[in-house]
Image (cartoon, grey):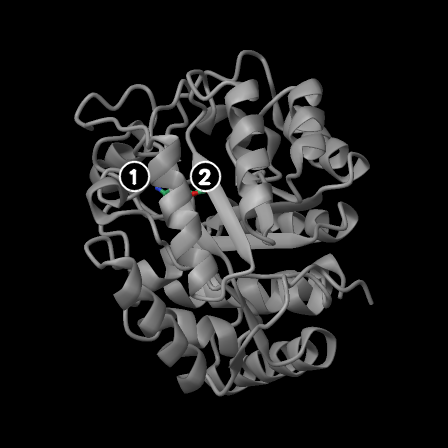
Amino acid sequence: MDKKEILYWLKETDENRLNYLWEKANSIRKQFVGDEVHLRALIEISNYCVRNCLYCGISIKNKNLVRYRMTEEEILECVAFANKNGYRTIVLQSGEDPVLSAERIAKLIQKIREFADMAITLSVGEQDGATLKLWKEAGADRYLLRFETSDEKLFQKIHPSAHGKRLQYRINQLRTLKELGYEAGGGVMVGIPYQTYESLAQDILLFKELDLDMIGIGPYIPHPDTPLGREFLDNYRLDKEKFVPNNELMTYKVLALTRIVCPDTNIPATTALATVNTSKGRILGLQRGANVIMPNITPPKYKKLYELYPGKSSADDDPEIIHQNVLNMIKEAGRIPGKGKGDRQKA
Ligand code: 5AD
């Protein structure tokens, strides 16, 4: 699919024609990655962050947020829960927290490695090459780092404290990750203010160019305690001709198109999607291209504080309940829970 066709679909509104897109994405999903839905247990280990991303609720500039950092014991308890419930992947996510030093994370990875045969995914922001290498050698398998947008100007606007690091740095990080032997994950938010259709189409082509192993796509959700959220809520008037709306339908379009363009990659039905449609978001995601769910098993007292955006789906629920809900969802979508680690199987 070329850029022109991607743009056509991003602007399509006719329900019948969109049904064709959903069906095409679903059949490609079935053909390339099958009916298994891989589960990744997500643990949000710290909400400290030194960065000032304008969209993000855990940015250093948000003074209305209580900060936490899980202890190693607490993290390992979560890992034990995941292991007991059949999860074969653990995702450790945090802000860019300097107290979680390279060595400290490396030790944690080693401990998890000794303890359980699980794939370990990290999602802890931009890091230097030596750190990424250390963690790979300690036993990490995968790394998530969304590039958020392929529009350089917009990237710079929404990442002001990047210490001169620009979009190209982020893209190079993804390339480095692959060179180091990680499975690399990227992704974008759909409908960040001033995101053009043109750039969103380019985002999808960049997924392909980078040959990403995992691609996370969710709607932008304005957070009132962030500069971009305030701008969105107070002043932003969407110019429908030019800019992309941050709605559920647009997110499904990007998901479906991504599946068609990158047929063998792992794509989650994201928490942000579940946040804009609690009862059906993930199920529809699974039926329109996704093949992964990342149940959040962070203890509720911390999970509530990991507030990238407000209204986060199932923020109050205990891990047991979340686990059951996810299994039901998979069933309702007509699918089966994955059995192995769910590595990307390259076509
Ligand atoms: N709305 C939606 N997604 C967000 N993220 C951060 N802030 C928001 C928001 N306000 C996403 C970013 C980041 C991922 C961990 O969460 O894409 O990479």
- The x, y position of residue 281, in whole percent, is 37, 70
As measured in the structure, the alpha-carbon distance from the residue carrying label 1 to the one carrying label 2 is 10 Å
Name the residue beneath numbered marker 2.
93
Residue located 54% across and 36% down the image: 111
70 relative to 248, above or below: above
Which amino acid type is shown beneath numbered disc 1? Answer: Tyr
**Quarter of image, res 64:** top left
Q: Are marks 1 and 2 in contact (CB under 8 Å)?
A: yes
Q: Quadrant of ligand 1?
A: top left
Residue, far front: 114
Outermost residue, top side: 163
Residue visible at 78% across and 34% down?
A: 180
Tell which of 135 and 63 is nearer to you. Answer: 135
Query: Split into 4 quadrants, where in the image is the C terminus?
Result: bottom right
Q: Is ligand 1 within 8 Å of the beta carbon of the residue shown at mark 1? A: no
Quadrant of the drawing holding the N terminus: bottom right
